[in-house]
Image (cartoon, rainbow, N blue to C red):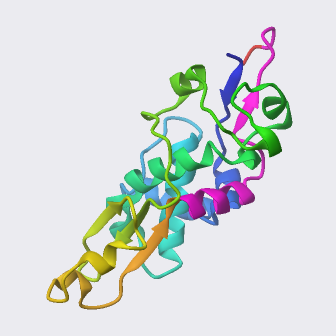
Amino acid sequence: MPIRITPYTPAEVAIATGRTVVNQRNDRRSGYAPRHHGHARFDLIGVARNYVIQSFAELGIGPASSVRFADEAGNAIARTLIRQPEAWSWAARSRYPGMGLGGRVVGVHRDLIGLLPFQYEPPSIMQGLIVWANGDFEISPKFIAAPGSKLPRERKLWGPYVTMGFGFAGWALAERLPRPIFDWVEENETD
């Protein structure tokens, strides 16, 4: 299938996530992000991971803490990003067999699944990340209801906690992309 997941440059990641090129470089130097050989390029998960790190940095939770959950949260956000039409080029949206009415991705074609850097599971709008008051974190299938299922004596509730809904984060990230991440490549084009 001629769908391509286009890599992003650090400058494009900065536009999409708010994480500056300098901070991205500092993250790699400090061991909070993978090092690149040659020029840095980011795949779908790398863009989503930077979004997570920057979102928490804006709340005062730096990469030394957010790196613990950035990969899992980035994977989940990347799964929701697949369903956002803003993440797809016009050419891909008009030809992709999984597109539905209104440009929403209603199915993930098996050939696209083969391109993904993770095992695809359908996303849930209710799935999200909770960073508890004691610093623990969890990926919850119902992040909004999860705090109510805890007992008051649990230390994780003894202070403020932060939540991030993956469906909402995927939508917000898709809105900020400087160009589509999923593109259509004609059979005779070469990379």
Give the image quarter of residue 128: bottom left
Name the quarter where the N terminus is drawn.
top right
Query: How far across and down, in percent of the image, does residue 177 sit?
Result: 73, 53
Residue 40 in view, yes or no: no
Name the quarter where the C terminus is drawn.
top right
Q: Is residue 53 magenta?
A: no
Report the front residue among 65 and 98: 98
Query: How far across and down, in percent of the image, does residue 97 sit?
Result: 72, 25
Query: How far across and down, in percent of the image, does residue 141 sit?
Result: 38, 58
Vertically, is 8 above or below 23? above
Residue 118 in view, yes or no: yes
Q: Total of numbered circles in the picture?
A: 0
**Residue plotted at (49% across, 41% down):** 122
Report the front residue among 56 and 33: 56
**Residue plotted at (76% across, 49% down):** 86
Read off the magenta span.
167-189
Vertically, is 115 above or below 18? above
